[in-house]
Image (cartoon, rainbow, N blue to C red):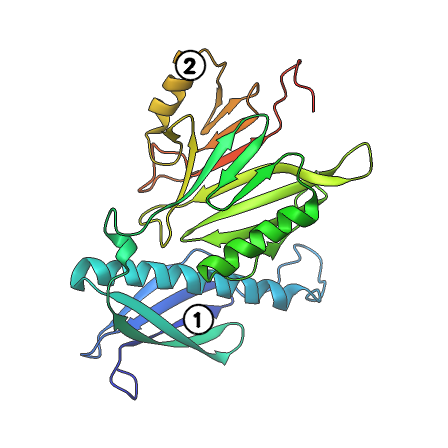
Amino acid sequence: MGPDGRPRGCCCAAADGWHCVVVDDAGGERRTELSASGTRWNSGARNDPEPVWWRQRLAETAGGLRGLIAEALTDATFGEFGAEAAISWFAVDDPVDWEGLVTLGEPDPARFPGRVPPFVVTLEPGRGAVLPDAHLLFSTRAADAWATLDAVAELYGAPAPRDAFVCGFAGHRSVRVGRGSLALSTEEGADGVERLAEIVGTRGAGWGGNPELRLRLDGVDLLDDPAADVVTLFRDLGHDVVERGRTARIPAMGLNLHEPDRPGPRTGRFTTVALQFPSAPDAVR
């Protein structure tokens, strides 16, 4: 127990990996090994020193793992006690050693169907997408696309959109929606103007968070209906679906659907949907 009587835990790294320890009110410990590389910089056969970006990489790894721990713990707490668990993290040795105090609270209303409206992104192939309070068209300029993500983050109290490098695109930013994410990529056109080029929605296993991200096309919930049913439906509608491994593509719509790489609770359902401008021969932007 922590000094105020609350359960506590830690997220720590060693040279060869990361782990989490949760301490219950009786002093019992539950240790979980976390899937992430350790703190040792490995340069292969060479004896190169750690690069300047290595500490930042460790901080990003630690932040991601703390997020996964929080999700797993609150899901387990809800399943056992019907309550949410919030973790207050404190750095012991930033970025590789953290301690956290756990506070229990009322369950999130979004855990109960129908209590909180989902965040619905309606995809319109060849045009873009419709959000609850905005449109994202393939004619949208980059600055307006980023402003839309900023507005989503502000509306739902999510962290500010994250910038990332994605090969083949001029810009890429993503915002958290519940436990999913909405990401936009841009490219520069022949006229030198940077515009929206791809819309990506991702939602992992388990509860979708508050609000839950939904991606729909022609009334089909692409992340909720079984993947096989989604593929069959599009084929019945006359679309050419190209399947390769865990990916299904509909080139004429610019639609790409991905199942998780590893078996899990979402096996058999898509977890990522990406929409680009269609690659059909007669498509004219």
Q: What residue is rendered at 58% in x and 50% in y? A: 148
Amino acid type, callout 2: Arg
Question: Crowding at label 2, few (<14), some or many (≥20) Cα neighbours within 10 Å?
Answer: few
* Residue 206, horizontal then vertical, whole percent: 31, 48
Q: Secondary structure at mark 2?
A: helix
Please name whichever residue, 44 or 148, is drawn nearer the observer in this view of the structure.
148
Please name whichever residue, 243 or 199, is drawn nearer the observer in this view of the structure.
199
In the displayed structure image, the side of residue 119 where residue 5 appears, left or right: left
Please indicate, yes or no, whether residue 16 appears anywhere in the rendered image: no
CA distance separating discs 1 and 2: 48 Å
Please name whichever residue, 107 or 74, is drawn nearer the observer in this view of the structure.
107
Q: Against 26, is 259 above or below?
A: above
**Which disc is residue 235 wearing?**
2
Q: Against 101, is 216 above or below?
A: above
Earlier residue among tags 1 and 2: 1
* Residue 190, horizontal then vertical, whole percent: 81, 32
Q: Quadrant of residue 71?
A: bottom left
Q: Quadrant of residue 188?
A: top right
**Which disc is residue 177 wearing?**
none
**Which disc is residue 12 wearing?**
1
Amino acid type, callout 1: Cys
In the displayed structure image, the side of residue 83 where residue 216 appears, left or right: right
Question: Crowding at label 1, few (<14), some or many (≥20) Cα neighbours within 10 Å?
Answer: many
Q: Quadrant of residue 285?
A: top right
Please indicate, yes or no, whether residue 65 appears anywhere in the rendered image: yes
Which one is closest to the eye, mark 1 or mark 2? 2
Q: Secondary structure at mark 1?
A: strand
Q: What residue is rendered at 17% in x and 64% in y? A: 81
The reply to whether dot 1 and dot 2 touch (C-beta < 8 Å) is no
